[in-house]
Amino acid sequence: MITEKIIPFEKKVWLSSPTMHGKELEYVTKAIDTNWVSTVGENIDEIERRIAEYVGCKYAVALSCGTASLHLAVKLAGERLYGMPKAGEGTLRGHRVFCADMTFDATVNPIAYENGEAVFIDTEYDTWNMDPNALEKAFEIYPDVRLVMLVHLYGTPAKIDEIRAICKKNGALIIEDAAESLGATYKGRQTGTFGDYNAISFNGNKIITGSAGGMFLTDSKADAEKVRKWSTQSREAAPWYQHEEIGYNYRMSNIVAGVVRGQIPYLAEHIAQKKAIYERYKAGFKDLPVQMNPYTPDSEPNFWLSCLLICPEAMCKQVRGDNDAAYIKESGKSCPTEILEALASCNAEGRPIWKPMHLQPIYRTNPFITVSGSGRAGSNAYIAGDKTADIGADIFSRGLCLPSDNKMTAAEQDAVIEIVKSCFA
């Protein structure tokens, strides 16, 4: 229900759109003028150097997207753990990988690319990331697992120390999906440096962008060289095209790198703008039965997306199918479906929280681990106690992503706040 005083925005207020500053065009134009438009060039060299320096790792390899970075990280981990595969055989060869449950499917799909099976680890309320207690339970059920895919959702660091300690105890490697968290820190250290293999993204809506692109981050020279080789079709050092292993066309172009290069100087500014948006929402919603996406005192998110979670007692009746949703309006209550519809009717973009992977049709038969109760290990799920233990599903049901564009004015954000408030009238 929209109050009469709220007028739809003339220009769309976006969830998170690219913010260009002018230098991007300069670097792209130079690449075109000098004919360095393919997968080598000054822009690529420079962003690899600058990102590695910024996050504090030794090597960065610029790739076509964050998913490519994750795929090659999975491939590296699989070869390290299980040896070289036969032709046509994935490096994971049916082995299980523990993976964050509430994430975008780009986190999970590379496991399938390498013929592995993702085992989804439930979420915890403190950060909306992988629950260390559920991870510990997962190792009790599947003690042979040796690889964990960790995610920092919406730019908020997970409980890294706890998760690393559990992995170390169980002899497991970590792939750190920091696609959403470039610039976020945990105990003063940049995300993207805590895993055995690490990946970031420069997708169009990320904190800085190249329109596309991603990076593999590592302290291992051998791993960096392997990723460079694989990402350029695994060409051998021969005067002709010699191939001894499967390769991929995953290298970033010098054009995309030019956009990233022009964005890097503005990373801190973008983070500050995103944090200001988060704080304004937090203040604006102080009298509503909602809370913002949380983070722990030992971390500093990059505040990529501001999200809210409706208190259980303030939820009206809401039903979701695979492709649609419905709700019943109740006085003093609301739900994500109502709020998102209200925002859309006023020309503002919101988004549901990432739907947990264990609820996705493609992955519904995969194992899913929650933390409490005695539970059981089944062919498709470990449900601890009852369904109320499914924290990811609960956050998905009650949460939504708010317009978080760093070009949104304070007046526009105030109007968004009023739209949300009207839904609880």
Image: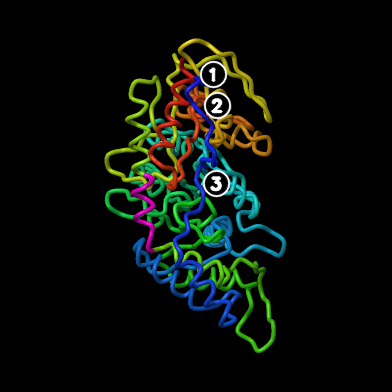
Q: Could you say whether the residue bearing mark 1 is in a helix, strand or loop?
A: loop
Q: Quadrant of residue 75?
A: bottom right
From where the camera sits, is residue 357 visible? Answer: yes
Question: Mark 2, residues whose alpha carbon is within 10 Å: few (<14), some, or many (≥20)?
Answer: many
Q: Quadrant of residue 280?
A: top left
Mark 3–mark 2 Cα distance, whole angstroms, equals 39 Å
Q: Is residue 21 magenta?
A: no
Q: Which mark is residue 97?
A: 3
Q: Are marks 1 and 2 in contact (CB under 8 Å)?
A: yes
Query: Could you tell me residue 155's position as x and y percent?
Result: 42, 46
Name the kind of residue labelled 3 in the image: Val
Task: Decide which of 110, 412 is in the foreground and name it.
Answer: 412
Name the kind of residue labelled 1 in the image: Met
Task: Decide which of 107, 339 is in the foreground and name it.
Answer: 339
Q: Is residue 373 left or right of residue 68?
A: left
Task: Decide which of 218, 21 is in the foreground and name it.
Answer: 21
From where the camera sits, is residue 82 visible? Answer: no
Q: Which residue is mark 1?
A: 1
Q: Which residue is mark 2?
A: 342
Q: Could you say whether the residue bearing mark 3 is in a helix, strand or loop?
A: strand
Q: Main secondary structure of the magenta part?
A: helix
User: Which comes before the other along the chain, label 1 or label 3?
Assistant: 1
Which range of residues does the magenta coloring cover?
265-274
Query: Could you tell me residue 34's position as x and y percent?
Result: 56, 83
Q: Could you say whether the residue bearing mark 2 is in a helix, strand or loop?
A: helix
Q: Residue at x 38, y 39 (%)?
A: 410
Question: Mark 3, residues whose alpha carbon is within 10 Å: few (<14), some, or many (≥20)?
Answer: many
- Compared with 92, 101 (above or below) is above
- Compared with 96, 54 (above or below) is below
Mark 1–mark 3 Cα distance, whole angstroms, equals 44 Å
Name the kind of residue labelled 2 in the image: Ala
